[in-house]
Amino acid sequence: MDLTMHWVGFATLVIFILAYAVVITEEMNHMRKSVPVLLAAGVIWAIIAGYYVQQGHVHETEAALERFLVEFAELFLFLLTAMTYINAMSERNVFAALRSWLIRRRFGYRQVFWITGVCAFFLSPLIDNLTTALVLCAVVLAIGHGNRRFVAPACVNIVIAANAGGAFSPFGDITTLMVWQRGHVQFTEFFALFLPSVVNYLVPAAIMSLAVPRDRGTADDVPVVLKRGAKRIVGLFVLTIMTAVSFHNFLHLAPFLGMLTGLAYLKLFGYYLQQTHARKLSDTPGYGTAGDIQAFDTFREVARVEWDTLLFFFGVIMCVGGLSFVGYLAEVSVYLYGEMGPTTANVLVGILSAVLDNIPLMIAVLEMNPPMGLDQWLLITLTAGVGGSLLSIGSAAGVALMGQARGQYTFISHLVWTPVIALGYAASVWVHLLISGG
């Protein structure tokens, strides 16, 4: 039933807008972003189901809800494995060792600007843009010592690089992961976005680097010893990614099953680390340092997963699913992709992601499922991924760094560079259209 002009439709729309307004103001109200969307999801579907039951349609909403639940479950299990591996590598000092190595090289500010940016660009396709940004921001803060002329543009640079790097890999961002799991873009086809992503990063970075002082940082940092098994866990993570890709490409199974198989790799290796913990204490170089006293426990790393983020994804998928079930997304799809055309629509969605989170926007596009070719699905993947760089609140990386570098990297310090970021955004879209012939 089309309920877009019915009180049920209006009610669901108002509830979602109110809930998302609370999400946007998370920094001010200090309420976890999962809370309002979880509540909104329950209320929205209760209203819809109540009306359908009154009309004598008992099973339609149940079937629709199960479809959205399956979509979330696949995303949830995939991310659960990825986040567990990231936590395990963090616990084994992988990221701390990278940070220590960069700091001890005593690079100049402008060198650090480029090194952290390039590292962010190439790390985010593997470990997601948020984790990448947090790790490299710690390097910038340690070297910058409160030098805002360096810290502010360096943080902006990291956000742009992390978002751009995440756009050409299914593992770099939630939006790319969803597009891949839906089957619109195959794994190897994402690499067609590599050159547009490079342009998106290099254009603003080249301009911003001119404002970075040439001074040399004076940070001191002691070497960090990798805990036992750290390198092997990194190798298992790469093997897990290969397993997920192989399951999807060759066996035509959902990628989450390959990731869960990879989680078993980690748990088996974790069992080995636990069983050999005491025996290896005295004869392993570096063992017992940097807090490596407690045996490795994979379940502890699962518990440290960012549950607020995962529950937020559930709430958003269910809320957007409710709006789709009512009929709003079909109306929007006709206007955006029918009247305006897919290129204009996809570029606008990317710009809108600077204000609204790109996750609900991508979920909405996937639910609309407009008839687009590969070139346009790649375009929306690119724009939704890099459009959030236009403002500091437009991506998880930007929001996280505002908290990590509080007072040095702010909304205003990012806004100063929005014109050059927009130039990079436009250039990347132009390069993609040029390559794809669009």
Image: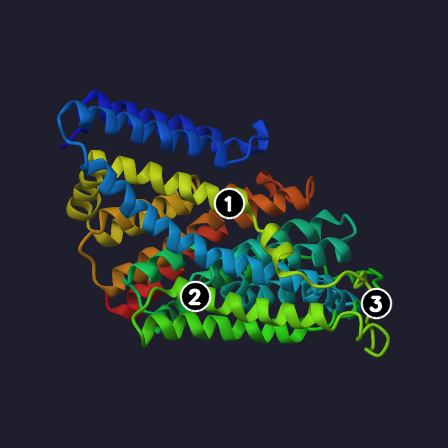
Q: Earlier in the sequence, mark 2 or mark 3?
A: 2
- Between residues 55 and 352, which one lies in front from this camera angle? 55
Q: Position of residue 310 (x, y in %)?
A: 48, 46
Q: Type of residue at label 1?
A: Thr
Residue drawn at the location 48% of the way across and 56% of the way down: 79
Residue type pointed to by label 3: Gly
At x 80% / y 68%, what residue is drawn? 104
Seen in the picture, residue 86 relative to 13 is either above or below; the reply is below
Say which element carries label 3. loop
Separation (CA) of disc 2 from disc 1: 20 Å
Disc 2 versus disc 3: distance between alpha carbons?
Answer: 37 Å
**Residue 361 relative to residue 79: left or right:** left
In which quadrant of the rendered image does the N terminus lie? top left
Q: In screen coordinates, is 416 left or right of 314?
A: right
Judging by the rendered image, the residue that carries numbered circle 1 is 309
Residue 255, position as x, y percentages in the image: 38, 65
Crowd around label 1: few <14 · some 14–19 · many ≥20 (10 Å) = few
